[in-house]
Every structure is written in structure tokens, then in C-alpha cells.
């Protein structure tokens, strides 16, 4: 029998690259996906295009792990590209067992000099308001929604063929990579949070369709992970050196200071093993699971010392 097949969108970088490797390490043939557009205009610091990174990764997985691996390009913000991508992968490998919808971007605003600036919601310039919401929703929500729809349809057709042939209906799985930003509030990244909150509902609806065909649909919601996405400036400056921290560094300092139970931010491998595991559980569906080192668990009590010290500081300031 042939290897099972996994498509991981956005696997030319960061979390997706680690996830696609995890599936290959478990003897899946894999489709490594990249965005067809150039990535030089973003803030992620890549020196190679998505195509170059995806092709190199596919070559490496074939050579190191002995699986079939191929690179596929698609800009998932475009109407038909998700359908074309999923169909192309199915055609290339002849089956589709797991789809991880992982492609995603954050919202940001650049000033005239190209520097990323952060605006609180109420202060965001009007020309950026709709533009950033549309850009982020087109990729994170609409792209994922279309990938999920096509994957579910193809998986249901495969199940139907197995049923008609009187053979076992295999367990298949769709996993959306969401984010704890679906609930964690942050005034400067509302479009991103909206896109991830929207994905949660796609999961719930799709799980109902998939269940009778032995297809499970879930979301993995990572906390902050060190990837090119979180290498952008955070706006937080070291009071001693004056150096601006990246998003990853800022959340790393918070983790050290007690913002989460595990006092470090995540690595792509930390969430890749979770992504693989969540697709292997035949009786878990419609779940929205945080993999965040405890960032979103109820954390007021462990942080009582931080809040107490801040309360005392503010009270002193009011008395002056
Ligand atoms: N890093 C975190 O802290 C964190 C936390 C929670 C959730 N997440 C989520 O995890 C996922 C991966 O993030 P990451 O940190 O690994 O980011 P990343 O390193 O920037 O990777 C993003 C991936 O998405 C692809 N992509 C970008 N625009 C696309 C488009 N228009 N169409 C199709 N694909 C596109 C990129 O392709 P190219 O490389 O070709 O541009 C790349 O493969 C995202 O959904 C993100 O929201 C990340």
C-alpha cells in the first residue's frame, strides 16, 4: 500500500516547514506549499524566495527520509488558487489523507520610510483600516476556508469510494493552524485576531460534515513561536541599550517574567509534534486546542506579585 499523503500549506517557512518534516518523519509523502508571490517586501528577513525554500525542503525530505515530496506554489489570497492547489496535490499523489491549513500573515502598517509602525485601534490611519483587514482575511481566513472546503470534498469522495468498494473507510484529518490571538486581546492586531477567530467557526461547521466519513477537523492554536513571522520589530525598546526587541524576544521576556506556565516561548518543533498528533486521533473532532506553554490558561493568580507591584507603583504615583 502507498504511503499516506499530507499537504501542509505555508510549509516554505517557520511552523509549516516543521510540520511538513514531522509528517515526512512519520512516513507520509508530503506536499510542501509556498506562496507564489515574492517575499522580499515583507518583514520576515528571508533571503530566498518561497519557491526556493520549499524546493530545498522537498529535496531534503526525499533524500533524508526516503519519502515522496514535491513543492507546489499558490497564492491563497486568490479566488481559485486553493482549489487548484488541493486538486494538483491529489492528482500528483493519487490520495489525500491529511491537510494542514497553516499559511498565514500578520497585519502591519508601514510608514513612508517603509518602517513598521504600530497603531492602537482607535489611532489606525483610515487608509490602512480596510486594507489590512482585507489583506489578512483574504489569506488567513478565505484562503484557509477554501483549502478546507476542497480538502473535505476530496476526502469525502475518497471515503465514498472505499465504502462502495466494501473496504475500510480510512481515518483522514484536516487541521487548521489558528492562534491564541483568537481570544488574546491586542489592540494593534485586531485583523489578525478576527481572521483566527473566524477560522474556529470553519472548524466547527466542517467537523459536522466530515464525521460520517471518518474525517476529523480540528484547530491547533499556537502561542508565540520563534519563526520569521515573529522576527518583526515589537515596538518595545530595551531601557538600557535602546535596542528594539522583536516580537519573539518581547514575548520571551514576558514568559521569563511569568506570563505563562512554561517560562519560554515555543519552537516550531514544539507545535509540529502537536499538529501531527492531533491528526492521528480518530475520535477527536471540532476542537480548538491551544499549544502555548500555558499562555492562555487562567494566569491571574500566578501573576499576583507582578500585579501587586504594579498596583503599589500606581498608587504611589497617584499620591504624588
Ligand atoms: N509564529 C507564531 O508565533 C504563531 C503563533 C500562532 C499562530 N501562528 C500561525 O502559524 C502559521 C504559520 O506562521 P509562521 O510563524 O510559521 O509564519 P512564516 O514563517 O511567516 O510562514 C508563513 C507561511 O505562509 C505562507 N504565505 C504567506 N502569504 C501567503 C499567501 N498569500 N498564500 C499562501 N501562502 C502564504 C508563506 O509562504 P512564503 O514563504 O512563500 O511567503 C509561509 O510559508 C500562520 O497561520 C500563523 O498565523 C504563528
Image (tube, rainbow, N blue to C red):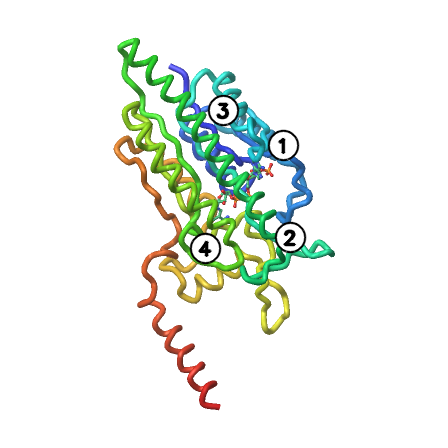
Q: Name the one closer to the observer, 170 or 139.
A: 139
Task: Give the labeled residue for mark 1.
Answer: 36
**Is there a contact, CB below 8 Å, between mark 4 and mark 3?**
no
239 above or below 47?
A: below
Say whether disc 2 or disc 3 marks the residue closer to the N-terminus.
Answer: 3
Task: Give the labeled residue for mark 2.
Answer: 127
Residue 203: percent from left, percent from top: 37, 37
Q: Is mark 4 within 8 Å of ligand 1?
A: yes
**Is there a contact, CB below 8 Å, between mark 1 and mark 3?**
no
Disc 4 from disc 3: Cα separation: 32 Å
Task: Give the labeled residue for mark 4.
Answer: 265
Foreground: disc 2 or disc 3: 2
Say whether disc 1 or disc 3 marks the residue closer to the N-terminus.
Answer: 1
Answer with left or right where residue 48 lies relative to residue 142. right
Task: Give the labeled residue for mark 3.
Answer: 86
Q: Residues within 10 Å of mark 1 (few under 14, many from 20)?
A: some
Numbered disc 1: secondary structure: loop
Answer with left or right where residue 5 lies relative to residue 11. left
Disc 1 from disc 2: Cα separation: 26 Å
225 above or below 171?
A: below
- Name which residue lies at 62% across and 52% down: 128
Residue 299: percent from left, percent from top: 34, 63
Numbered disc 2: secondary structure: helix
Disc 2 from disc 3: Cα separation: 34 Å
Q: Is mark 2 within 8 Å of ligand 1?
A: no
Disc 4 from disc 2: Cα separation: 34 Å
Amino acid at each position: 500500500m502507498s504511503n499516506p499523503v499530507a499537504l501542509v500549506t505555508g510549509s516554505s517557512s517557520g511552523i509549516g516547514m516543521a510540520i511538513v518534516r514531522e509528517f515526512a518523519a512519520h512516513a507520509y509523502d508530503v506536499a510542501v506549499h509556498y506562496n507564489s508571490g515574492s517575499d522580499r517586501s515583507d518583514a520576515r528577513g528571508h533571503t530566498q524566495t518561497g519557491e526556493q525554500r520549499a524546493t530545498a525542503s522537498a529535496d531534503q525530505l526525499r533524500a533524508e527520509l526516503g519519502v515522496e515530496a514535491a513543492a507546489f506554489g499558490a497564492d491563497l489570497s486568490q479566488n481559485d488558487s486553493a482549489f487548484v492547489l488541493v486538486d494538483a496535490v491529489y492528482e500528483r499523489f493519487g490520495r489525500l489523507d491529511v491537510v494542514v491549513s497553516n499559511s498565514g500573515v500578520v497585519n502591519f502598517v508601514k510608514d513612508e520610510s517603509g518602517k513598521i509602525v504600530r497603531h492602537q485601534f482607535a489611532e489606525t490611519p483610515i487608509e490602512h483600516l480596510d486594507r489590512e483587514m482585507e489583506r489578512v482575511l483574504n489569506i488567513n481566513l478565505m484562503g484557509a476556508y477554501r483549502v478546507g472546503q476542497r480538502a473535505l470534498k476530496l476526502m469525502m469522495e475518497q471515503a465514498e469510494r472505499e465504502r462502495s468498494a466494501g473496504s475500510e473507510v480510512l481515518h483522514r484529518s484536516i487541521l487548521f493552524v489558528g492562534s491564541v490571538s483568537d481570544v488574546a486581546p491586542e489592540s494593534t492586531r485586531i485583523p489578525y485576531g478576527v481572521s483566527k477567530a473566524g477560522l474556529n467557526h470553519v472548524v466547527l461547521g466542517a467537523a459536522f460534515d466530515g464525521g460520517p466519513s471518518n474525517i476529523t477537523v480540528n484547530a491547533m492554536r499556537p502561542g508565540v513561536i520563534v519563526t520569521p513571522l515573529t522576527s518583526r520589530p515589537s515596538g518595545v525598546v530595551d531601557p538600557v541599550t535602546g535596542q528594539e526587541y522583536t516580537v519573539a524576544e518581547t514575548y520571551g521576556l514576558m514568559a521569563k517574567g511569568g506570563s505563562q506556565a512554561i517560562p519560554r516561548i515555543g519552537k516550531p518543533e514544539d507545535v509540529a509534534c502537536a499538529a501531527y498528533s492531533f491528526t492521528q486521533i480518530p475520535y477527536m473532532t471540532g476542537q480548538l486546542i491551544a499549544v502555548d506553554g500555558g499562555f492562555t490558561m487562567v494566569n491571574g493568580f500566578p501573576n499576583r506579585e507582578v500585579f501587586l507591584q504594579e498596583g503599589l507603583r500606581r498608587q504611589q504615583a497617584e499620591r504624588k
